[in-house]
């Protein structure tokens, strides 16, 4: 039996890409509400462009998204029809603490999330909750400088405590921060203000250290307040190959991994790895870690490791390389001539998925949870409005086969698999709606026009069979 009994098949979305309802239920404004679709998106997301942008010239997709806020019952019923065992979504911090620094949580926000969780449980679906998925209350950004301030660690603990108090008895699976390595590569998008370039390393490491402490507190609170639950970290996987077999290219792979792994290493091992300590020393930064903080990190480590996987890239140690670049989740990289790419330039690499599962398991020796995987592409409805997304079925089938082999042949422990954007959501990278991942089509365009009606794609029935056969029937 390749997939173990109890394997958690399901799907995943995030609050800012699905929920909408930005001014309902007492929710406060968050950073994601101010990120436009279109050419200014990356500059705002990475903190390079000053806010706020003009509402009349920009469209802000997170504000209404696919209106999961009002459709969650209907959507969860559709997930249940596919047989989901789990459903992953995130919480909007500003729905629970509108400004982030109130003494008491917004009960309407907690009510919303409790009702959502109850709806999942009523359908036999285990909630998998990401505490935050790239969001932060805008007031925490403006008044405290986001993760540039120690006070934010306190505010974040207050948020986690309120969440565990209300949902801790019902939710068994938790994640700290979504794609923490990508988030830490863009700390200015999380409110950190870096005025002078020479301060960049110090401010970045200090923000990372605050975020690492916030993770440790979240894990501590989860273990104390929800003893039956498990909590994991979440990595944007960034498997890279050396462009050639030149040793310099392989060394570049190690350097790339050092950039990507540190925030996962600290949540698994409970201390910063030597490569990171040396890097900070080289940059003249001393975090001044007290014994108390060292103990906090050491004593509060994750139960499992989760990650997203979409594509792979190549790296080169040759600074003068003229190799062709291509897109990818989070970063552009060198295009691998052996692989096809999606319309967004993301290389499709199922075997890379098996390699990654092995690498992560070898490195951490913790159960893994695949919490994002899927194909973001354009779907064209036929004259009846139906989408025959055989390309999506092929992508998912090829990846699930590799995951099966990693489990069956290589002995990798995998807890579950949630397909990203199981219902079409707004693209995190581009803010577009036309980049779709779902089994369920949402009638909405890049400017937010459309009925938002939901309809099943061909892949909907295919995934239902996959789940009911526990991965045996992939045809
Ligand atoms: C991950 C994120 O980076 O990749 C999601 O956790 C995102 O938020 C997903 O949506 C796919 O990226 P994109 O840009 O295709 O939406």
Image (tube, rainbow, N blue to C red):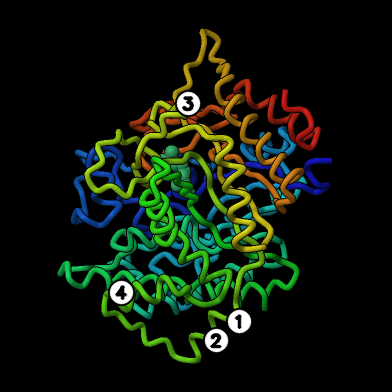
Residue depicted at x 78% and y 43%? 3
Residue depicted at x 59% and y 19%? 390
Q: Earlier in the sequence, mark 3 or mark 1?
A: 1
Structural crowding at the residue carrying mark 3, measured as other residues with C-alpha within 10 Å and reported as few (<14), some (14–19) or many (≥20): some
Q: CA distance from mark 4 to mark 1?
A: 28 Å
Q: CA distance from mark 2 to mark 1?
A: 6 Å
Q: CA distance from mark 3 to mark 4?
A: 39 Å
Taking the view exactly as shown, the residue that stands out farthest to the bottom is 291
Closer to the camera: disc 3 or disc 1? 1
Residue depicted at x 50% and y 85%? 294
Q: Tell me if residue 462 comes above or below residue 250 in the rendering.
A: above
Q: Quadrant of residue 188?
A: bottom left
Give coordinates of residue 255: x percent, y percent.
39, 58
Helix, strand or loop at mark 2: helix
Q: Earlier in the sequence, mark 2 or mark 4?
A: 4
Q: Mark 1 sits on what residue?
A: 299
Residue sitting nearer the eye, 4 or 405: 405
Q: Mark 2 sits on what residue?
A: 295
Q: Tell me if residue 422 comes above or below residue 465 in the rendering.
A: below
Ligand 1 within 8 Å of the CB at mark 3: no
Asked if disc 2 and disc 1 are in contact, CB closer than 8 Å, the reply is yes
Q: Quadrant of residue 361?
A: bottom right
Q: Mark 4 sits on what residue?
A: 144
Q: Earlier in the sequence, mark 4 or mark 1?
A: 4
Asked if disc 3 and disc 1 are in contact, CB closer than 8 Å, the reply is no
Asked if disc 3 and disc 4 are in contact, CB closer than 8 Å, the reply is no
């Amino acid at each position: 039996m390749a997939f173990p009994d109890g394997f958690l098949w399901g799907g995943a979305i995030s609050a800012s890409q699905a929920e909408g309802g930005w001014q309902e239920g007492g929710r406060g404004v968050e950073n994601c509400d101010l990120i436009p679709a279109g050419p200014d998106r990356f500059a705002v997301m990475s903190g390079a462009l000053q806010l706020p942008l003009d509402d009349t010239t920009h469209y802000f997709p997170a504000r209404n998204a696919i209106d999961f806020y009002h459709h969650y019952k209907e959507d969860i019923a559709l997930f249940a029809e596919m047989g989901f065992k789990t459903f992953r979504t995130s919480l909007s911090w500003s729905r629970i603490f509108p400004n982030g620094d109130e003494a008491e949580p917004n009960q309407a926000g907690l009510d919303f999330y409790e009702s959502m969780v109850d709806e999942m449980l009523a359908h036999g679906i285990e909630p998998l909750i990401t505490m935050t998925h790239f969001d932060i209350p805008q007031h925490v950004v403006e008044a405290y400088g986001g993760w540039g301030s120690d006070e934010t660690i306190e505010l974040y603990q207050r948020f986690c405590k309120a969440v565990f108090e209300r949902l801790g008895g019902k939710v068994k699976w938790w994640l700290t921060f979504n794609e923490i390595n990508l988030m830490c590569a863009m700390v200015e998008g999380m409110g950190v203000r870096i005025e002078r370039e020479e301060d960049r390393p110090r401010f970045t490491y200090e923000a990372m250290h605050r975020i690492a402490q916030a993770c440790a507190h979240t894990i501590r609170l989860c273990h104390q307040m929800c003893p039956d639950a498990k909590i994991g970290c979440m990595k944007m996987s960034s498997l890279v190959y050396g462009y050639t077999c030149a040793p310099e290219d392989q060394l570049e792979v190690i350097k790339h991994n050092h950039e990507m792994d540190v925030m996962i290493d600290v949540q698994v091992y409970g201390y910063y790895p030597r490569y990171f300590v040396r890097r900070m020393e080289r940059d003249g930064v001393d975090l001044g870690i007290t014994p108390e903080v060292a103990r906090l990190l050491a004593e509060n480590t994750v139960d499992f490791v989760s990650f997203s996987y979409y594509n792979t890239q190549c790296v080169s140690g040759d600074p003068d390389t003229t190799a062709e670049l291509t897109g990818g989740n989070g970063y552009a990289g060198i295009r691998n001539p052996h692989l096809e790419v999606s319309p967004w330039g993301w290389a499709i690499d199922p075997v890379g998925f098996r390699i990654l599962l092995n690498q992560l398991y070898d490195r951490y020796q913790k159960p893994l949870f695949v919490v994002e995987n899927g194909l973001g592409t354009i779907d064209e409805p036929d004259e009846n409005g139906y989408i025959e997304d055989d390309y999506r079925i092929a992508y998912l089938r090829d990846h699930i086969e590799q995951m099966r082999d990693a489990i069956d042949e290589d002995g990798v422990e995998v807890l579950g698999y949630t397909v990203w954007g199981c219902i079409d959501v707004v693209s995190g990278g581009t803010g577009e709606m036309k980049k779709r991942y779902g089994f369920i089509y949402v009638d909405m365009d890049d400017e937010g026009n459309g009925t938002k009606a939901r309809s099943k794609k061909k892949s909907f029935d295919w995934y239902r069979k996959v789940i009911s056969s526990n991965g045996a029937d992939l045809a």
